[in-house]
């Protein structure tokens, strides 16, 4: 793995997220003290692709599940479960609670209905891909979870 | 320079070859001029090489002049597979926006009238065509209608009152992809599609009103009706949520299936399965049904454009010139070593470009070759090309599909503000309508490569020939 940039290093110390560039699209990266927390932060990064996070009010919660034979596919399935709920419910989510047991993930996502005027969503996310996908413990013992989104 | 040209053998001014090494089964061939090659991300080189490692690949892994870093396949990648030789079909190779494509329709309304009512036209199109995130259409299909749409494509749309029967011969597959099987599509994919029928989507999708600005091939331009000053409507969109969901589901399933089938993937995004396997066949049925969804969607939006034109310019006609798809895998007949074979041709961000005389072309196009519609960025204009006979030997009759991004959305957002982009284009007489100024900034003209360099290389490489250049007057941005 390439060395982390100074901003990435700061992010890696806390539960945090960031975007990283991909030729045509955008990558989402979450950090956390556990794998589940890194998954939560990757989801926060996904929302931030669409709209500034502070604009998303936490009014309504949705329960989600995902499964995958390994961590990388599980991450992609988790992000895609969110993309699906966002598309079919017409919602944006700003807060996430994830638990992972073996190859299964349970989550609660909290947010509100999309308001085109207020959220000004930039782009529709088609899906999370296996491109540059990575779920790993980084040298400081914390977790990183990342994937490139197709937008 | 991103790609070391020393790694490439220069075959001609516009053709570059990476000889097979390591796990590569065939060479990788890139069509581009030296400047475009130097500008390509090293990932293009790596991805073209990775595709060359897949089982059953025939002749070569190709990259078009607009190739850029994609998912598994480069965007601008073309590869054909032989089922009898253990060939694969790849969900990653087709991508999430299945059958995303472009249609161009010719209007008989004269340019001065369009210019006089340019703003009114822009507003009416913006009102009529749902675009952007969270915008839903007025059409809600029942489950039965959804299945009919998935097997019938644009033919279904016409039957249902959206579109005209004469459009069908001007659409790839005559408007209906055979083999599309609604039973292979999950309920989730159908649910996701329900509110999205007849919507444009977001990102790089658009509806434009354009004017013929320059003619390169007079005979072909006349055959397409594209004489100087004529106005067209061009629509760029795909299979919407249904295609995205099909891509998502099969990508994960094929990542597992490939392992079970003993296929070593150099990149997990190349997720694929043997064509002659249960998963492979089920994906083909689903992906072909998603192609029908895209064909139906563009036919419906074309119908909306006709309604708007008729409202503002009563009696106006919009005749479909052609409708092409970019992200597909189709069975086609190609001659390999003197023998005609059925191959599964993947085009990821590449356009089919049948040359003159191809049996699939309708009467009005057979002598000229298939129209190849190339979208540029918002401010720079687009091109119409025509298929050539030489393209068959170059890359299974394929050509580029657009300008290709020069920078990431991330970087674009740092470089431009949506409002400024809209004002700058307005000063040039181009009206942009969009619900998201951030979306406009991400799609700023400067975020894309020079489309002219791409089509020039495409022509000089013999993949297709230039017919006309179009400039935008109105752009409805997703």
Image (cartoon, coloured by chain):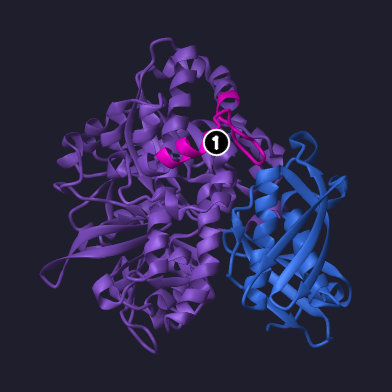
Q: Nearer the viewer, residue B357 or A41?
A: A41
- Report if residue B110 is visible in the image: yes
Q: Whole-percent x and y of residue A24?
A: 57, 59
Query: Where does the C terminus of chain A fall, quadrant-wise?
Result: bottom right
Specify the chain shown as purple: B
Q: Could you tell me which residue is drawn at 25 percent across and 49 percent down?
A: B387
Q: Nearer the viewer, residue B399 or B363?
A: B363
Residue B145 lies in the magenta stretch: yes
Specify the chain shown as blue: A
Residue A13 occupies which quadrant of the picture?
Answer: bottom right
Q: Could you tell me which residue is drawn at 88 percent across and 45 percent down?
A: A59
Vertical comparison of B190 with B299: above or below: below
Q: Could you tell me which residue is drawn at 55 percent across and 43 percent down?
A: B193
Residue B123 occupies which quadrant of the picture?
Answer: top right
Mark 1 is surrounded, within 10 Å at the Cα level, by few (under 14), some (14 to 19) or many (20 or more) other residues, namely: many
Q: Main secondary structure of the magenta part?
A: loop
Residues rendered magenta in the picture: B127-148
- Mark 1, chain letter? B
Would you name the residue on which mark 1 appears?
A: B199
Residue B144 lies in the magenta stretch: yes
Q: Whole-percent x and y of residue B459?
A: 29, 54
Query: Where does the N terminus of chain A fall, quadrant-wise?
Result: bottom right
Asked whether, in this view, residue B164 is left or right of residue B476, the answer is left
């Amino acid at each position: 793995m390439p060395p982390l940039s100074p901003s990435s290093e700061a992010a890696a110390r806390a539960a945090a997220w960031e975007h990283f560039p991909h030729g045509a699209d955008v990558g989402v990266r979450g950090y956390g003290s556990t794998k589940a927390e890194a998954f939560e932060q990757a989801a926060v990064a996904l929302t931030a692709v669409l709209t500034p996070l502070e604009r998303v009010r936490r009014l309504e919660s949705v329960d989600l599940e995902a499964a995958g034979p390994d961590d990388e596919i599980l991450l992609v399935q988790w992000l895609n479960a969110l993309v699906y709920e966002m598309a079919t419910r017409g919602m944006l989510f700003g807060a996430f609670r994830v638990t992972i047991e073996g190859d299964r993930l349970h989550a609660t996502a909290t947010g509100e209905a999309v308001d085109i005027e207020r959220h000004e969503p930039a782009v529709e996310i088609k899906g999370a891909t296996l491109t540059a996908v990575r779920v790993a413990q980084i040298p400081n013992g914390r977790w990183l979870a990342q994937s490139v989104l197709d937008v | 320079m991103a790609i070391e040209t020393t790694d490439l053998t220069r075959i001609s001014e516009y053709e570059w070859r990476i000889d097979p090494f390591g796990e590569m089964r065939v060479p990788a061939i890139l069509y581009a001029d030296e400047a475009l090659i130097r500008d390509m991300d090293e990932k293009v080189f790596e991805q073209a090489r990775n595709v060359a490692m897949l089982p059953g690949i025939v002749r070569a892994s190709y990259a078009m002049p607009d190739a850029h870093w994609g998912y598994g396949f480069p965007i601008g990648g073309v590869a054909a597979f032989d089922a009898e030789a253990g060939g694969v079909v790849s969900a990653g190779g087709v991508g999430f926006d299945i059958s995303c494509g472009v249609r161009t329709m010719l209007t008989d309304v004269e340019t001065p009238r369009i210019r006089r009512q340019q703003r009114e036209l822009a507003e009416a199109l913006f009102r009529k065509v749902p675009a952007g995130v969270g915008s839903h259409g007025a059409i809600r299909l029942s489950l039965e209608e959804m299945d009919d749409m998935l097997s019938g494509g644009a033919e279904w749309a016409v039957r249902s009152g959206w579109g005209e029967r004469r459009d069908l011969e001007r659409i790839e597959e005559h408007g209906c992809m055979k083999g599309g099987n609604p039973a292979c599509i999950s309920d989730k994919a159908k649910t996701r599609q329900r509110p999205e029928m007849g919507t444009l989507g977001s990102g790089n999708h658009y509806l434009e009103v354009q004017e013929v600005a320059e003619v390169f091939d007079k005979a072909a331009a006349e055959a397409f009706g594209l004489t100087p000053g004529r106005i067209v409507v061009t629509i760029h969109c795909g299979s919407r949520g249904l295609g995205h969901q099909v891509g998502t589901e099969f990508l994960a399933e094929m990542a597992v299936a490939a392992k079970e089938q003993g296929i070593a993937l150099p990149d997990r995004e190349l997720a694929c399965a043997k064509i002659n396997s249960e998963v492979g066949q089920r994906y083909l049925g689903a992906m072909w049904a998603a192609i029908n969804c895209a064909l139906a969607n563009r036919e419906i939006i074309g119908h909306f454009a006709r309604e708007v034109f008729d409202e503002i310019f009563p009696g106006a006609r919009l005749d479909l010139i052609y409708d092409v798809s970019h992200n597909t895998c189709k069975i086609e007949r190609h001659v390999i070593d003197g023998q005609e074979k059925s191959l599964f041709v993947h085009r990821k961000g590449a356009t089919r470009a049948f040359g003159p005389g191809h049996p699939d072309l309708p009467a009005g196009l057979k002598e000229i070759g298939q129209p190849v519609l190339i979208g540029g960025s918002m401010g720079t204009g687009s091109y119409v090309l025509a298929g050539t006979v030489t393209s068959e030997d170059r890359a299974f009759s394929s050509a580029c599909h657009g300008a290709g991004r020069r920078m990431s959305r991330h970087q674009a957002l740092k470089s431009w503000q949506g409002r400024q982009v809209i004002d700058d284009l307005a000063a040039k007489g181009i009206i942009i309508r969009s619900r998201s100024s951030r979306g406009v900034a991400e799609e700023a003209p400067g975020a894309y490569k020079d489309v002219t360099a791409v089509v020039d290389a495409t022509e000089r490489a013999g993949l297709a020939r230039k017919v006309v250049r179009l400039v935008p007057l109105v752009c409805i941005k997703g």
